[in-house]
Amino acid sequence: MIILGISYLSDAGACIVKNGKLVSVINEERLNRVKLFYGIPRRSIEWVLRDAGISMKDVDVIATQGYCSSEDGIEFINHGLDAEVGLMRDKFSYVEDKISKSCLSKDLKAYKLKEIRERYEHEKHVVFERNISLIRQFKKFKKPIKVVEHHMSHAASAYYASGWDDCYVMTADGWGEMESNILCRGSKGRIEKIALSNSFDSLGYFYGSVTKALGFIPHRHEGKVLGLAALGDADRAMPWMRKMISYNGVRKAFEGGFEAGLYAAKFENTRLEEIVKKYKREDVAAAAQRVLERVVLEYVNDLIPKGSKVTVAGGIFANVLLNQKIREKAGIKDLFVYPQMGDGGMSAGSALYYYALQKRLKPVKIGSLYRGPKFGDREVLSEIRRFGYSSSYHSDIEVRIAELLKDNNCIMRFAGRMEYGPRALGNRTILYGTMDRTVNDWLNKALRRSEFMPFAPATLWEAAEKCYRRIANYKERALHMTTTFDCTPWMKKHSPGVVHVDGTARPQLVSRNSNPSFHKILTQYYRLTGNPSLINTSFNMHEEPIVCTPNDALRAFRDSGLKYLAMENYLVVNDKDDVLNT
């Protein structure tokens, strides 16, 4: 069976699942250069078919996510959505009652009730109709269309890539149909839903509304809030922040604090923006991060038995510090974060889930994330010449890169197949030494970024315990930059450029098996400097997707003003007078 998986939400993309195996996958933003593209991923569909060596006539089924009323050629796989519509209606009445009995002013009560009614109607009609109109466009392919619930798609992406036959599966994000979170039990290749939180009570809307109130773009800049959090005092803003959202142990769900007048099931929250003005933004960010960690840990501790393995997906789990806290403080045995945790991972989740309904599918470890396009020397050299740069060929380019890095040069690197997911993992990446405490300022300025987190380190697999605490049993969890770890005193001393003020870093461990070429660079650099880590940040300019093609790479190289670009075996040098000296 060959399944074409399609996601059309933010970070839309496509995949091919053949006989239960994910054989090709990509996200549209890398191809059309529109960051977090929302819509039909036409280029992705074309690319995955070509990459898998098939055509549309070979596809048996199209799988996607969302909601669609069943019609000719479209089947909505219902896991009790009708009951969830009822739950949403009950939740609406429950919230309405809480607001009516609250101590809010008459005007604020009226405003909150209007807001919740509008949200209910938006979820029930606008969102569904938008999903339906997009899904109907797939009918032109003249293939059976199977529609999987949003959060089941997230759950499937995490479960079937975990390698764990028996585990708990948790999802959390802004919203998906009627839900913002589910908890499932994964066992013997099947996923069973056991708890859910309504879309009214969304962790994603909580954290996203704080993101917007602090002047950032929600659903895009939550990482900036996480970076700010370590610089603030959470206690100062906690008295009202903790009223925004909580875990209700009776309802077994997250619960927005509508009756406090602070929570809104959307990113726009005028009252929150007014309150934020009373505090330093670092303190607001710190309080938001603490509340997020607290309520998630309460949820996990209440609903998931001690010693269980847990796998997670959904945009909330892009929060790498939260993932560390779950792993270390929730009493679980192990945590696997699906590397493409946001909506960009749902093409794979939808396809895998539908396949598992037809034939029992055993979870397998996700394996390599280097699944994107690759370009040969001829294509690379042609683009270098077209841009007018000089270059030199090096058969052992990894050694030359290490030598340049030893001399404190910054290298943009383009090699092999592009990474799948939001993190640069060495093939579309920018490298620099970790000793420079000022690197966050000057390199972010060159890339036109404004970040508060330090750059992340890539570290040799063999030196993990030297650099990070409590990592010995969790080294595989550090392959994809999905969680932070506490740094050792040695790491803090020798790599201050990648250690956050809270003493953590978000490492990518690089083994010989995971990326032989990148491992060779790190190994040679270690021999030359005694340091097993390098700064590894994504190869892109601010608000652009990670580069995909040689043309993308050379444009970013030109715009950055950096001096060196390693493209496959070619070293490109910017000889212009205004080159940034590092």
Image: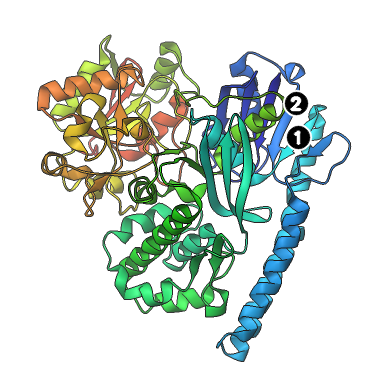
Q: Position of residue 57 (x, y in %)?
A: 77, 17
Judging depth in this view, the residue of 582 and 125 nearest the camera is: 125
Q: Position of residue 366 (x, y in %)?
A: 48, 26
Q: Where residue 146 is drawn, which disc sits there? A: 1
For the question of whether residue 575 can be seen, the reply is no
Q: Where residue 323 is drawn, which disc sits there? A: none
Q: Which residue is mark 2?
A: 61
For the point 82% across and 37% down, the residue is 74
Judging depth in this view, the residue of 576 and 429 nearest the camera is: 429
**Amino acid type at mark 2:** Val
- Above or below, 58 against 290 in this view is above
Considering only order in the chain, which callout, 1 or 2, is on the residue closer to the N terminus? 2
Q: Which residue is most to the top?
A: 395
- Above or below, 421 against 67 in this view is above
For the point 26% across and 12% down, the residue is 394
Which of the colour schemes (rainbow, by chain, secondary structure, one colour) is used?
Answer: rainbow
**Quadrant in which the N terminus is drawn:** top right
Q: Position of residue 458 (x, y in %)?
A: 27, 32
Residues marked 2 and 1 touching at CB (< 8 Å): yes
- Above or below, 306 against 582 in this view is below
Q: Is residue 421 left or right of residue 230?
A: right
**Amino acid type at mark 1:** Lys
Q: Is residue 458 left or right of residue 356?
A: left
Determine the secondary structure under disc 2. strand
